[in-house]
Structures are given as structure tokens and as C-alpha cells.
Image: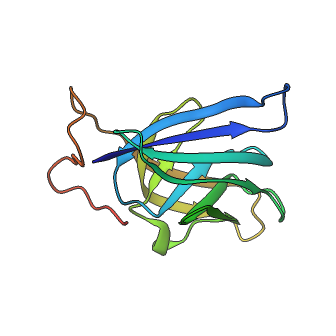
């Protein structure tokens, strides 16, 4: 079963602004988000419309280009601003607008003045549930 991730910024407009609507395979309790808004509403549902989790997740630490979201159902989304390390390789990365890739590599300067990363993108027509290309290394 696939999961739909609706991420909205609560910073703009009366009802906020859509940041990303992304589809992943089901079961991902941890995802990375690139350039996440400071005030974020998260809703994760199955492709059948069943709610996995809904909640707000606001930045409480210094900005990082990558945010780790961890689901704690029924209604909590834990958030951490991270500089990815090897434990994050293989996690889905949700990008603004809704594209989803898988983190393959990350490196950065000790002072965080620069970073370099690699993300793999793959897709399948028809979006079969829980599809992944052969040999893809994923973390859940």
C-alpha cells in the first residue's frame, strides 16, 4: 500500500500553503524533507484514504537543509533538523513540490558551510503499491 504525504507550510495565507504532496511506499516511519518550512503541518494517509498520522511539526533548532520527520501515531510527528550521516542513507527524501528520491550519499563541511548529496529517483507507470526498482537499498 502506498502512503500520501501532505506537507503544508502554516506560514502563509489563512490556511497555509502546500509545500509538497508526495507518494511513497507504505511503512516509512522516517523520511527526510529538503528545505522544510519552519511551521509545518503533516498528514500521512494510505492510498485508500485511511489516516496514518496527522500533526504539526515546527522547527525548534537551527536551520538545516534537511529535516528528519519521524511518525509517532496516532497524532505525533517528531522533527529534527539534521546533517545526514550514514544512518540516513536509504531513506526517502521529500522535495518541495512533491518529488521523492532516496538518499544515496551525503557529505558536508564540519562548519556546515557546504554540502554535497546524491539522491536517486525512480518511478513506475501506474504506481503499484510498495514498488521499488530491483536492487534499491531502502530504510523504513
**Residue lying farthest bottom?**
87
Q: Find residue 83 and report its horizontal and vertical position in percent.
A: 65, 65
Residue visible at 74% across and 57% down in the picture:
64
Q: Residue furthest left?
A: 134
Left or right: 10, with 54 as reference point = right
**Picture quarter containing residue 37?**
top right
Q: Position of residue 80 (x, y in %)?
A: 69, 66
Q: Quadrant of the C terminus?
A: bottom left
Residue 49 x, y percent position in the rendering: 41, 39
Identify which residue is drawn at 27% across, 34% down: 123
Q: Is residue 48 above or below residue 70?
A: above
Tell me where residue 93 appears, x and y as whole percent.
49, 49
What sort of colour scheme is used for the picture? rainbow
Is residue 28 or residue 80 the one in the foreground? Answer: 28
User: Which one is in front, 19 or 103?
Assistant: 19
Q: Residue at x 78, y 31 (%)?
A: 16
Looking at the rendering, which quadrant does residue 17 occupy? top right
Answer with left or right where residue 88 lies relative to residue 38: left
Amino acid at each position: 500500500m502506498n502512503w500520501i504525504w501532505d506537507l503544508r507550510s502554516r506560514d502563509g495565507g489563512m490556511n497555509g500553503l502546500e509545500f509538497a504532496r508526495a507518494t511513497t511506499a507504505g511503512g516509512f516511519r522516517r523520511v527526510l524533507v529538503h528545505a522544510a518550512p519552519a511551521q509545518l503541518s503533516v498528514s500521512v494517509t494510505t492510498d485508500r484514504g485511511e489516516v496514518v498520522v496527522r500533526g504539526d511539526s515546527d522547527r525548534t533548532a537551527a536551520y538545516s537543509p534537511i529535516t528528519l520527520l519521524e511518525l509517532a501515531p496516532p497524532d505525533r510527528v517528531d522533527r529534527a533538523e539534521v546533517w545526514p550521516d550514514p544512518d540516513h542513507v536509504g531513506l526517502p527524501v521529500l522535495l518541495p513540490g512533491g518529488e521523492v528520491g532516496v538518499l544515496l550519499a551525503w557529505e558536508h563541511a564540519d562548519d556546515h558551510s557546504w554540502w554535497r548529496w546524491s539522491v536517486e529517483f525512480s518511478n513506475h507507470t501506474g504506481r503499484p503499491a510498495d514498488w521499488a526498482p530491483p536492487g534499491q537499498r531502502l530504510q523504513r
